[in-house]
Image (cartoon, coloured by chain):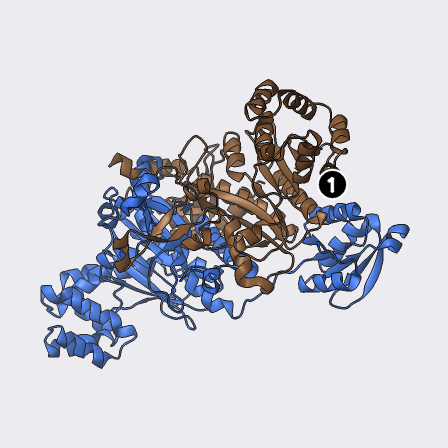
Chain colours: A blue, B brown
Amino acid sequence: MAQAAEPPSGTRDFLADEVRRRTAAFATVSDVFERYGFDPLETPAFERLEVFAGKLGEEASALIFKILKRGVHEATGEADLALRYDHTVPLARVIGTYGSQLPSPYKRYAIGPVWRADRPAQGRFREFVQCDIDTVGSSSPLADADTVWAINDALTALGVPEFQFLINSRRALYGLLDAYQVPEELGLRVLGSLDKLDKTPPQQVIEELAERGLDSDTAKTLVEDIVGDEAGMRARLATTDRGRIGLAEVDRLLELTAGLPAGRVAFTPRMVRGLDYYTGPIFEVTAPGYPGSIASGGRYDGLVAKLGGPDLPACGGSIGIERILAVQTAHDAEVRGLEVALTVLGAEDDVLRLAGELRGRGLRTAVYLGTSGKLGRQLKWANDQHARTVLIYGPEEQANGQVTIRDMASGEQTQVARHQVAEHLQRVLAGV
Amino acid sequence: MAQAAEPPSGTRDFLADEVRRRTAAFATVSDVFERYGFDPLETPAFERLEVFAGKLGEEASALIFKILKRGVHEATGEADLALRYDHTVPLARVIGTYGSQLPSPYKRYAIGPVWRADRPAQGRFREFVQCDIDTVGSSSPLADADTVWAINDALTALGVPEFQFLINSRRALYGLLDAYQVPEELGLRVLGSLDKLDKTPPQQVIEELAERGLDSDTAKTLVEDIVGDEAGMRARLATTDRGRIGLAEVDRLLELTAGLPAGRVAFTPRMVRGLDYYTGPIFEVTAPGYPGSIASGGRYDGLVAKLGGPDLPACGGSIGIERILAVQTAHDAEVRGLEVALTVLGAEDDVLRLAGELRGRGLRTAVYLGTSGKLGRQLKWANDQHARTVLIYGPEEQANGQVTIRDMASGEQTQVARHQVAEHLQRVLAGV
């Protein structure tokens, strides 16, 4: 019973203040994306199972929540639908569905829950909000820069005080492999090891590279160079074709984001960003006080086709909004109380009328709905509701056509004529 | 393939304008509910299956989307989770979970999707938004009135031009059965037939009542009285104990909503509102031009306990927001275009900087991301984006430190100094 009362493992109930905080954050981000001309897209919570089948890696596929067939088919134990695992597979499906009805390029944002049957852990949930922008149908470096600018503005609007875009290019990474003559078949595993350099001491990465079959001298030089000075790395990359192309890509992105605050965007040769689908510039955002990365993205030209959509170039990014909200919880626990609490001591119909007048002026107003006729009990209720003011409209006030207004912070009480209460309170609560 | 591209049966993709329209409507409603002191609540998309088990009727249970167990348990074909069928079962669960941490009474609103494996039909979906308010822990008639007021204000804010609350009381309905000496065992079936009087001719209902076993003279008198004048019905109800109690309940609600526009709330003796869980006053809202009812609710004192929560009195209401949005679609198909479209004819980094300045002033601004260097092609893109203005910043303009601003409606072009563009456009687009 106690267990049944909890929400399912890995999910959360959001009570009032938390809903308000989250809703405000999502609205902040969508305002920024709208200003960039991104269009919102909302797809269903579930897709046909075959939309996911074979589209995600094996690891991801194991994390999909599958929905049982219904009615007479339920007994088969088979599933035909699956909860949304991310916003990218549905995006590819939508591009297939609507094609030329969509603007070209199609710049869309999606802010909404996704579901993954991951092992729940501190800060890892089975239902969480993903916050993505993607631009499908443009191969221009301006599209990559647009993504970085938009995410920069969204993080700023969310109140992240300091952060940095670490950028790199998949092509530069291939150039790196060429420059150090890493055997083709070791390439991806070498990059996988280098990706750990943000958390793992260089010596350990060197050992792992050697274990993975890289010549140990090469491993040592590679790691030392990559965490060494940028000029040296650039010179080395410039010795290969793919390295030069990658560097040019990085430099173009640096140029196109030069309007951002100084140092906001930094070439980071060791940054790999997973191994799968990125094909061009990639980025990751880190911020002091926030764990891991708080945003990431890049260009993934082959992905839409791989996911079943048409073959279009694409790039995008994702903000780790849950991670940001988790850090901000501590210093942003505002409670939204009532502006006006109305006690009920007779004249109920007029009390409701008065409440209507106050709401008409935009004031958050509630009426006592309990059974006690005692003012003390009703004041306790108002206090529990964090009410700023309480109205007392007892028999005496009713007889005189007056309402007593009590300021809950100071305890001060003033009498105001019944027909002037709404106007008076609007003025007082506006902070005069 | 064509079929796979569609969203799953009974679900919808919402593209840009539709998402914006829906989001705005939901925000309008939640603003109203906030003003009444209702708190938002968001529960997970799914609950443990046992939270629903035995809580919903058989018909409803068949409509639940069940989620297959994961990992090694998937092969059992068993489900352990179920998608949210409504907002009421999760509310009862939350009250069990958080109890005294919640305000008392607990006034909460929930606006979010629910899922039902209903047969899809015109206007009936498997994923749709429900929009509920509920007050748990108050038996006061003020709580019932509060619900009616809040829904009145929400419908008004949504722009429903004319509507009426039909009110009744479950107790008055029992009084009706007493007054016409309907045998106890026929009671619910008789009410079920009377509930059809809004759509079915009286004669047909009389016949159905007779078929269901009611004496045919009684059937005729009952139906004629119930669609006849209110005074007669009131007099008849006043002859029984339950009728008098019910009438008092109705009259109290009429008194407490007397501050609403005249005629907004009307006693409707034939209105039954389903047969299940209502225990006190009930209401239904109809509006010219809108099919069926666009809101409904009532008091359901036993339900929270029946759903597994503590035994608390409760009342609430629900707005048929999908139905309202469906009717409003026709006369509210606003397209949100760009305020500024920037062409790209060189100086890309400065174009992005300029875009940043415009967005900093809140203007919805996008940069051309295609490959064509031809102005004509870029203007076509801007036109497709419904841009109000287009900026042209070609080699000549760059050399002169000027930007050409084209008004897309008039075709008029003006030149403005590069550093004054943002300020100039903000002024122009504000509608001067």
Question: Which type of secondary structure does the marked residue at label 1 adopt?
Answer: helix
Question: Does the image show residue A84?
Answer: no
**Residue B330, placed above or below residue A215:** above
Does residue A419 appear left or right of residue B296 in this picture? Answer: right
Q: Can you name the residue that lies furthest to the bottom here?
A: A203
Residue B7 spot, x, y in % from top left = 34, 40
What is the crowding at mark 1: few (fewer than 14 residues within 10 Å), some, or many (at least 20)?
some
Q: Nearer the viewer, residue B305 or B26?
A: B305
Q: Seen in the image, is B144 located left or right of residue A216?
A: right
Q: How many marks?
A: 1
Residue that label 1 marks: B245
The relative height of residue B19 versus residue A224 in the rendered view (above or below) is above
Q: Most extreme residue toward the right, as rendered?
A: A400
Protein chain holding label 1:
B
* Percent coordinates x, y for residue B313 in the rendering: 64, 52
Please give the name of the residue rendered at 30% of the width and 54% of the height, measured from the top-left corner.
A64
